[in-house]
Amino acid sequence: MKKSALVLCAVAAVTATLATAVPPASGAQAERGPLVWEECATKSRPTLQCASLKVPLDHQAPRGRQITLALSRVPHTAKTSQGPLLVNPGGPGGSGLSMAGFVAKSLPEKTAAQYDIVGFDPRGVGRSRPALNCRPGHFDPVRPASVPATAALERENLRRARAFATACGEKYGDVLPFIDSVSAAQDMDAIRAALGAERINFFGYSYGTYLGALYARLHPHRVRRMALDSLVDPTGVWDDDNLSQDRAFDDRHKAFMAWVARHDATYGLGKDAGGVGAKWYAMREALAEKPAGKKVGAAELEDTFLPGAYFNGYWPRLAAAFAAYVNDGDSTPLVAAYDTFGAVDAAGENGYSVYSAVQCRDAQWPRDWRTWRADNDRMHRKAPFTTWNNAWYNAPCAFWPTHHLSPPDVANTELPPVLLFQGTDDPATPYHGAVNLHHKLRGSRLVIEQGGGNHGVTLSGNTCLDRHLAVYLTDGKVPTGDGEVAAVCEARPDPEPQPAKNARPRALSHPWSTMGT
């Protein structure tokens, strides 16, 4: 799923950083036919293999220009194989190379041993070639404040959005018409064919759930099993989905402010959630006037705190940085938090470039800026946390140099049972979208994490959810509960507060749980 504001870039950066542990294949590029796998083992992934695959840039012209996809694999070790399990971490723009090793390690050993677990960098991403980076330095601090309180701020943010779109067109005009979700789904079928498999299994997070649903729509009889976690609303691709996120992210930010208020003894920001929230917005206004460390202005503050909406394990460190700035006038922890959660490196720039290329190409966006202004002004009044940051993140689509496509209807009556997972309070993929996808996939089963506000809920410590996933992948069995929801798992508790000197984020079980879509 798209990552509102800079969280996609932060996550793409994290996944790409992990993927650097996956050495590139030493020149093996499989043409049509079996892939050539080479050892690229690491200390933590001793059986990891790498390969590359050439696919058509334009699947309507299969003998035309070819591009290269980077793949990774943890091969099965059981006597009997259940075939390939393709995995995708979301985005669009997320690198999937490291996800094969993560899934192989996180699933029960008996389950993982039955699959060839295959990760891949989608077209344009990471080690696939060409890899996009439209405008290096686009997110360098300090950017103009997101909320267009003055006409000058609005003009400057518009200039940046237009410059990004123009740069993409100038550098990648020949490939942008083919960086889209349908093309990526067709790439998955090319991977299936190169693996020599009649059918594939698929496990995807966030935007990966939309990619999986598209693949299933295009190739329903090629799907053996499919598990989807944190579900994109296929009826809102992509403008409506972003506006829906804005409200949900604001609710999640309020939940964080309430958590800080409950732990006033640690953070000293007050016992009233509304009052704590007011101090956060006052901090944003102050940073718009005087950026912390000449690095963290209002926009960068939003970038820093948005990952906390994806994963509550970050709350103690974010709260400590907030308290140090407000109570002690100490901006050092805030700058350090920005460096950890909000700063964008080259991998993040690549992720954002692909994000923009896919989102702007997949569907129609308003071309009249007055429509954007009206929609986001209206939403900002209800949800001021990150509405305008998200708007500027997506604003290049108002000026995108390619014609838009029309999103396919992913409705499907031809699939085996698909297993769906969703946190009820997930802000990145709000719950109503999960219900919409569930209704589109006949025979699917929806498992919810009741009260869960994190994004990417399986393989992150909830044993109830993980049990349903393991049973499904092992035996194909799905929960049979009556009603719209087939099974309910309770969310894990929020983290305990930590004093500022000890406030370090709880380790993520997987990097895409904070991300990006």
Image (spheres, rainbow, N blue to C red):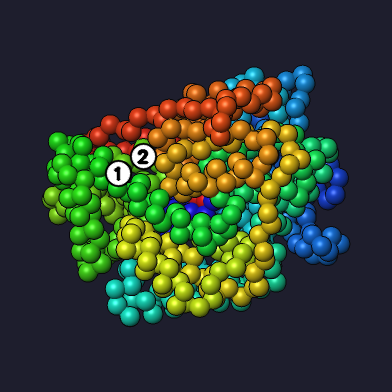
Check disc 1 and report its element: helix, strand or loop: helix
Q: Which of the pair 465/167 is nearer the observer?
A: 465
**Mark 1 and mark 2: span between their CA atoms?**
8 Å
Please identify the quarter of the rendering in which residue 73 is found. top right
Q: Is residue 132 left or right of residue 285?
A: right
Crowd around label 2: few <14 · some 14–19 · many ≥20 (10 Å): many
Residue 383 in the image: above or below residue 472: below
Residue 179 in the image: above or below residue 506: below
Please identify the quarter of the rendering in which residue 444 is found. top right
Task: Inspect this view and state whether residue 494 appears.
Answer: yes
Q: Which residue occupies 51% across, 56% down?
A: 241
List the residue tagged with mark 2: 312
Q: Is residue 419 left or right of residue 412?
A: left
Q: Which residue occupies 78% across, 54% down?
A: 54
Q: Earlier in the sequence, mark 1 or mark 2?
A: 1
Residue extending farthest front? 483
Q: Is residue 428 left or right of residue 232?
A: left
Amino acid type indicated by mark 1: Phe
**How far across and how far down the image is residue 508, in percent?**
44, 36
**How far across and how far down the image is residue 483, in percent?**
56, 31
Give yes or no for contact between labels 1 and 2 (Cβ–Cβ under 8 Å): yes
Amino acid type indicated by mark 2: Asn
Check disc 2 and report its element: helix, strand or loop: helix
- Mark 1 against mark 2, which lies toward the viewer? 1
Please identify the quarter of the rendering in which residue 205 is found. top right
Task: Inspect this view and state whether residue 23 appears.
Answer: no
Q: Which mark is residue 186?
A: none
Q: Which residue occupies 69% across, 22% down?
A: 475
List the residue tagged with mark 1: 256
**How far across and how far down the image is residue 213, in percent?**
66, 46
Q: Which residue occupies 60% across, 52% down?
A: 234
